Structures are given as C-alpha cells and as structure tokens.
Amino acid sequence: MNTVRQAANALEVLEYFARRLRPATPAEMADDLGWPRSSTFKLIGTLASMGYLYEPRARGAYYPSPRWLALAEAVAQAEPLPEKFQRLARDLMEATGETAAISAPAGIFATFVDVAESRQPVRYFAKVGDRVPIHATSAGRALLVQMPREEREKLYRKIDFVRWSPTTPDSAEAVEARLAEAADMGWHQSNIEYTPDLAGVAMPLSGSDRRLSVVVVGPVSRCLERRPEMAAIVAGHLATLG
C-alpha cells in the first residue's frame, strides 16, 4: 500500500516519543530514526510551529504537547465504542486467559479499536491501532461477513492474496469458503493464517450502527484445541449483552 511519507513521518515522531518518554533534540531524533537531519529539523520545526511539540527545557529538546491528547479525546468522545462493548475485551480476556480485541474495518485491513492483552508470559502482543489483513484473520472475516457480497467483491479486487502460511486463504473463493464454514460452525476461526503460532476465534458484534468484531487469540499450543470452548465463552458473553 502506498503511503504519504511526510504524514507517516509525523506520526512516527509521536510513536518515537511514546517509546522514549523524554524530550529529544532534532539531531537525536534523526539519529535514532535514521532520517536525514535537514528533513528532520524541518519536520520538527513544522510540528512545533503548529503547537504539537514544545521545549520543556531551554536546551533545544522537544516533547509532544497536550494538543495531541486534546484532539484524540475530542475524536474519541465524538465516536466512542458503543457502551455495551466497552468492557467486552477485558471481560473475555479474564474469562479465557487469552488476548481479546475488538476490530473495525479499515479498507483491506481490520484495525484493533480496543485490546485487553493476556497476562500469560507467552501471549499475543497487541495494541490499539494494530491492523491485520481483513481476509486472512478470523477478526477480519467476522467483519467481512457483515458486508453485502457485492461490497466484499470490491474489496477482494484490492487485496494482494499473499500466502503467509499454508493455511492462508489465497483467493476470493477461499475466503468465501471460510465464511461459509463459519456460518455452519457459528464462529470464525484461524490457525497461523497470518501471524505465526497463533490460533483464535472471532464473532461479529451486532446491535450498533458500526461494523465491529471481537476476537480471542493466543498461542497454538494453548488455543488450537480450545477454539470451540473459547467460541462458547464469547457467545455466552454476547448473549448477556443482548
């Protein structure tokens, strides 16, 4: 997928500070990120002039301003996760012991909008904003099934059907077969289709005007044989939500 480099770099600056958690000079940022110093200085100057970075100490080091948080809070409050789903990922993580996430469609990807990470030492590491192929994951297919067939066909034409593993569905027909299989079982399932050594189950989330899905996923060694059990737990929690 093509990206706009300047936009990607601006967001990477924010991610950089989320890892660093202390001020940095433009020279330090350029060195740490492997960017040319001239373009880094211009980008930092632009972000500072717009109020997104400030100098907490008079040493030429910058840090993100609260403006990022104010904008993020305004956006989140305008389109929050439906209230009845706000604790769902956390409750499913507690009930299954595995990582649980709520996903929404973003083009040919499923993007995690809420995540409750397992407390197990060996687990699926995920965070809000992570995205996975919509066709090659149970979370994604639980979104695809909510779309009319015509809409899915349009998406399929945009997908590069890379085969990440022997279990990856590598054509539109293969994806449709997985959707039919899920209709018979009552849940969507995955087994190392995209991410190595992961197996999980997913279901659509109905009852709102948004397309959402919930997935519970963990290492194959723990979860492959547990998929029917995990699906029953998910179904039970969804039933209580109405």
Image: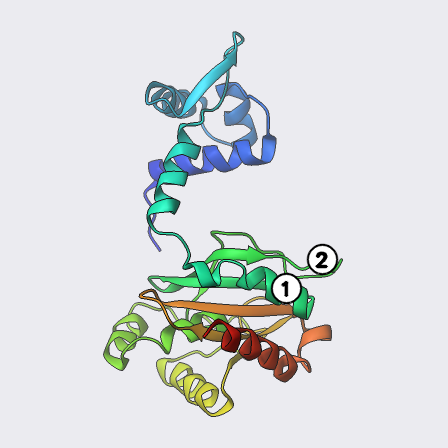
Residue 190 seen by the camera: no
Residues under labels 2 and 1: Cα distance?
9 Å
User: Is residue 95 something that shows in the picture?
Assistant: yes
Determine which residue is flagged by label 1: 93
Residue positioned 34% across, 36% down in the render: 6
* The C terminus lies in quadrant: bottom left
- Residue 67, percent from left and from top: 40, 28
Say which label, 2 or 1, has the lower sequence index.
1
Residue at image position (60%, 64%) is 91
Label disc, if present, on residue 119 of the rendered structure: 2
Q: Residues within 10 Å of mark 1 (few under 14, many from 20)?
A: many
Using the image, determine if residue 65 lies above or below residue 120: above
The residue tagged with tag 1: helix, strand or loop?
helix
Q: Which of the pair 101/181 is nearer the observer?
A: 101
Residue 89 relative to residue 158: left or right: right
Position of 217 with respect to 5 (left or right) is: right
Residue kind at label 1, given as amino acid type: Met
Are the two marked residues, 2 and 1, in contact with CB atoms closer than 8 angstroms?
A: yes
